[in-house]
Image: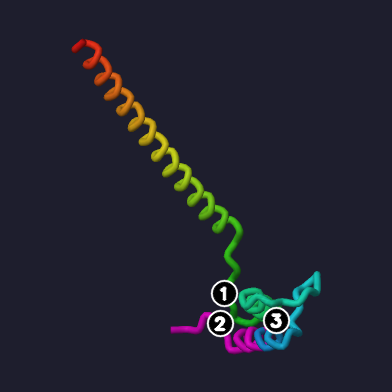
Amino acid sequence: MARKYSKGASKKVERAMKERNEGKLKSGRSGKKVTSRKQAIAIGLSEARAEGRKVPKKKTAKKTAKKTAKKAAKKTAKKSVKKTAKKTARKAAKKKSAKKSKRKSSKR
């Protein structure tokens, strides 16, 4: 099976990780020190991409937005199902209590 990332790309990531461990790695425009492992990897991959190394394309914002929208829709659907279930349970409980009170009043 072919490599996803070229050796050159992995060297860039390795260098970025070393710089991060030494406290020398800085982010792009702001120039702040990078402390996150994930951010260091992202910086290494981005530099490799800029040099034309073999690195898979970034996931587009559209795909991730669609996924998050789907998740949100599922959550809201679950919530609404739970709410309706609670409402029907409350209604059933009210009916039962109403029947009981009617029985008690008719027995007197």
- Label 1: which secondary element: loop
Res 97 quadrant in image:
top left
Q: Name the residue: 58% across, 55% down.
A: 62
Give the side of residue 82 with respect to residue 32, left or right. Answer: left
Q: Which mark is residue 43?
A: none
Q: Nearer the viewer, residue 101 or 34?
A: 101
Q: Which mark is residue 5?
A: 2
Say which residue label 1 marks. 56
> Can residue 9 be seen here?
yes
Res 5 quadrant in image:
bottom right
Q: Is residue 11 magenta?
A: yes
Are the residues tagged 2 and 1 within 8 Å (C-beta)?
yes
Q: Nearer the viewer, residue 38 or 28?
A: 38
C-alpha gap between disc 1 and disc 3: 13 Å
Q: Quadrant of the C terminus?
A: top left
Say which residue label 3 marks. 51
Q: Amino acid at mark 2?
A: Tyr
- Label 2: which secondary element: loop
Q: Amino acid at mark 3?
A: Glu
Q: Name the residue: 39% across, 39% down.
A: 81
Q: Name the residue: 77% across, 73% down.
A: 28
| Region in magenta | 1-16
Q: Earlier in the sequence, mark 3 or mark 2?
A: 2
C-alpha gap between disc 2 and disc 1: 7 Å
